[in-house]
Amino acid sequence: MVTLNKYNYKEHSEVPDVELQLVEDCADCPAHMLDIQEINEFLNEYHNHFHDDDGQPSWEQEWEDFGEVYDDEPAYI
């Protein structure tokens, strides 16, 4: 697995609100109480863990490879 460190904010005001909310939800404290380096480390670890590309195809791609088609809205329903 490749580890990416794409988050390198210098101050709290640079961090998007959605990322701050994620940090606060997981840290159970206001983000402004955390050091900006802690926020960067958390965001990098979180996104590397949950959004990593392990080289495996998605389940949709696997279905398609075997002739299956996934359709959220089939015409026959």
Image (cartoon, helix red, strand yellow):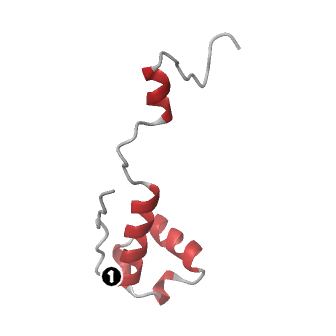
Q: Position of residue 48 (x, y in %)?
A: 39, 61
Which quadrant of the structure image shows residue 16? Answer: bottom left
Q: At x 44% / y 29%, what residue is drawn?
A: 61
Quadrant (top left, top right, bottom left, bottom right) of the N terminus: bottom left
Q: At x 56% / y 74%, what residue is drawn?
A: 26
Q: Which class describes the residues within 10 Å of circle 1: few (<14), some (14-19), or many (20+)?
A: few
SS under mark 1: loop
Q: Is residue 55 above or below residue 33?
A: above
Most extreme residue toward the right, as rendered?
Answer: 77
Q: Position of residue 38 (x, y in %)?
A: 40, 82
Near-viewer residue (25 or 5): 5
Q: Is residue 30 left or right of residue 34?
A: right
Q: Which residue is mark 1?
A: 11
Q: Is residue 28 above or below residue 76?
A: below
Q: Position of residue 22 (x, y in %)?
A: 52, 68
Q: At x 47% / y 85%, what residue is drawn?
A: 32
Q: At x 35% / y 83%, what residue is drawn?
A: 37
Amino acid type at mark 1 = Glu
Q: Is residue 42 above or below residue 53?
A: below
Q: Position of residue 39 (x, y in %)?
A: 41, 78
Q: Is residue 46 left or right of residue 27?
A: left
